[in-house]
């Protein structure tokens, strides 16, 4: 959470791909830890409703992670450090959504994600995110 909240203010610093890989690794590990708790919330509709109310009361929610990452991508795009064709909202959804899915698969299979596998996954995910549109040659 701390990494994502300060990320937009760090645009223009460091290497974008490395920063995004760091986000992907931390997000995957975070979702891996919280997934069992989140799944239990959905098993009890009354508990889920109270949880939603508590988030709303303090202006919090899972959307803030996407918003912070999108703000970072937008800032880097404006600085010309990532391709202008990258959509910040879609990029944030892609990166964080893939991390959630990877954590879900890990929880469902009962197979923890190794450090090497997590790093490899993050690097490949960022490579896909930063790919640019290419002209098709007939």
Image (tube, helix red, strand yellow):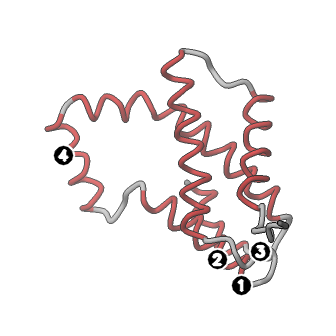
Residue furthest to the bottom: 78
Q: Secondary structure at mark 1?
A: helix
Nearest to N terminus: mark 3 or mark 4: 4
Q: Position of residue 37 (x, y in %)?
A: 38, 31
Q: Position of residue 81 (x, y in %)?
A: 81, 76
How much space separates mark 4 and mark 2, taking CA atoms?
34 Å
Nearest to N terminus: mark 1 or mark 3: 1
Q: Position of residue 14 (x, y in %)?
A: 85, 67
Residue at horizontal 55%, vertical 32%? 103
Residue at label 2?
Answer: 74
For the residue pair 60 and 90, the one nearer the viewer reads as 90
Residue furthest to the front: 138
Please, is residue 117 above or below residue 130 in the view?
A: above
Q: Position of residue 39 (x, y in %)?
A: 35, 31
Residue at horizontal 72%, vertical 47%? 125
The image's mark for residue 83 is: 3
Density class for disc 2 (Cα within 10 Å; few <14, some 14-19, many ≥20) is many
Q: Are marks 4 and 1 in contact (CB under 8 Å)?
A: no
Residue at horizontal 73%, vertical 43%? 122
Density class for disc 3 (Cα within 10 Å; few <14, some 14-19, many ≥20) is some
The image's mark for residue 50 is: 4
Residue at label 1?
Answer: 78
Task: Give the number of the mark in front: 1 or 3.
Answer: 3
């Amino acid at each position: 959470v701390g990494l994502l909240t300060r990320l937009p203010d760090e645009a223009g610093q460091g290497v974008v791909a490395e920063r995004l890989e760091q986000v992907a690794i931390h997000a995957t590990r975070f979702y891996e830890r919280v997934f069992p708790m989140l799944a239990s919330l959905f098993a009890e509709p009354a508990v889920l409703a109270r949880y939603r109310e508590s988030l709303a009361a303090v202006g919090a929610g899972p959307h803030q992670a996407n918003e912070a990452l999108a703000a970072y991508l937008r800032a880097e795009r404006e600085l010309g450090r990532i391709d202008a064709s990258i959509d910040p909202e879609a990029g944030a959804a892609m990166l964080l959504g893939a991390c959630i899915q990877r954590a879900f698969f890990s929880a469902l299979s009962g197979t923890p994600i190794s450090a090497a596998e997590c790093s490899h996954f993050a690097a490949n995910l960022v490579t896909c995110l930063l790919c640019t549109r290419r002209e098709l040659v007939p």
